[in-house]
Image (tube, rainbow, N blue to C red):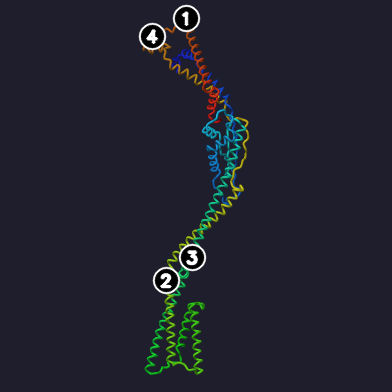
Amino acid sequence: MGAGLGDIDFRFYASIVLRRLPYFLAVAAFLAAAGIVIAYLLPPVYRASARILVEDPQISADMVRPTVSTNAIAQLQVIEQEITTRENLLALAERMNVYAARKTKLADADIVDNMRSRISFEQLQLNTGEGRGATIFNVSFEARDPALAARVVNELVTFILNKNMNLRTSRAGDTMQFFDQEVKRLGGILTKLEAQILDFKNANKEALPDSLDFRRNQQSTQQERLLLLEREEAGLRTRRTNLVQMFETTGKLMNAGPVSPDQQMLQDLNRALSEQLAIFAEGSPNVVTLQTRIAALQKKIQTGQDEKQNGKAGPSELDLQLSEIDERLAFISRERSSITAYLSELEKSIAATPNNETLLNSLERQRANIQTQYNLMVARLAEASAGEQIEIRSKGGRFSVVEPATAPTDPVSPNRKRIAGLGIAGGFACGLGLVVLLELLNRSIRRPSELAQVLQAQPLATIPYIWVAGEKQDKHRRMAVGCAIAAITSFIFLAALHFYRTPLRTVFEAFLVALDSSRVL
């Protein structure tokens, strides 16, 4: 370690430092001075801020479900995106005269980019100790004029509050309008379905499924009645034939007993009435018909007995019996035709009932489904109406200003000490870098050791460079002339640039703006 330090030629490096010291000092001093000047020439930037509190709904969601379910963070993000749109930013800059102090007019794209960089939104979460903290949003704006910064922030806060209210009320109104339209639409469909069901029932009232059991009972009863009439008809025809044959053979009638045909018919009708009463009520059509016939037949028998007792003359006994049998047969024929036609109608209605039941069930299902949807929409409409009233009266979740923006007294930028320190550090670094660069580019031989490396042999002796009389003065004179020429040329160039092109003051201001990261114009 000691041998290594002993090999270092400190005198050589000290001579290099002394020889390059003017370059180092010139660069370091220039950049340090430039950093200090720039630090104190940069204009101050003020930031004004306002705080917005997100309030919870004043009416519990368990009592009335809110119509607007978007949380506060999402709402603010939507509003933030709307604020930072091109049209809104240009309108805000023009309305608040943000760039009134500028001498040159900025392009719209530059204004939009600059306004976006100067507006900031920050979410703050306050812990209330109950597991859920209050949400606060911080809205800020930067400007060189503190009063302008405060006015712009208050304008943004007003826009946010109004937009939030309009957003919630419009959503609540749109929700209510949607459910109102749905209620009207479903109500119209329900009315049409009910009319269709009513028309279908009126058109098929004899073949509906709810009367199928009654019609089947009617069919069974009429079939039994038809069978009885057929048996009675066969018996009457046989009796008539026997009476005619007996009269033609003997010339007289055998008295089969005290029972006449009307009395026999009356007994049959009473028997049929007893059977019908065992099945149907007294008010059924069949029972009423039988009772009417029994009453008429009883009246007829009573009238015949009265005439016989009074000794009135009448037709022969054969004619009377045949007449009664023929009347009964004619009645049975008419009754059979009526029952047959009724049974045919019953068969058609019973056959059409399954198809009618299917169609009716389909209509009923549609009506039930629409009714369910209608009831749901009515309930949702009531909720939407209550939600709209909550939003209109500002009883739901809303934004409120906790702390409005005021004109700040202390600037937030630039950090003059930091800029000056960076200028000084950069000057030292650039000066040192220039010295290192000059030494790396210098390939001349300045030490005996370097000469030995070039010759690949150890020289006997080395003679340093011997300055002749006046040589150093000539060199210094040439350097001074060169510096003067460079200074004069630079001055002429800058003067021409100032008078014929952009003024240097404007260029310098643009340079300062660029150093300010284009945050505040």
Label 3 crowd (10 A; few <14 / some 14-19 / many >=20): few
Circles 3 and 4 in contact, beta carbons < 8 Å = no
CA gap between label 1 and label 3 equals 134 Å
Numbered badge on residue 348 = 2
For the residue pair 292 and 477, the one nearer the viewer reads as: 292
Circles 4 and 1 in contact, beta carbons < 8 Å = no
Numbered badge on residue 187 = none
Is 98 placed above or below 173 here?
above
Residue 6 location (% of width, % of height): 45, 14
Q: Residue at x 41, y 14 (%)?
A: 443
Going from N to C along the chain, the mark reached first, 1 or 3, is 3
Where, by quadrant of the figure, is residue 90 drawn?
top right
Tell me the element at label 2: helix
- In the image, what residue type sits under mark 2? Lys
- In the image, what residue type sits under mark 4? Pro
Marks 3 and 4: which is nearer the front? 3
- In the image, what residue type sits under mark 3? Asp
- Residue 230 visible? The answer is yes
Going from N to C along the chain, the mark reached first, 3 or 4, is 3
Going from N to C along the chain, the mark reached first, 2 or 4, is 2
Numbered badge on residue 469 = 1
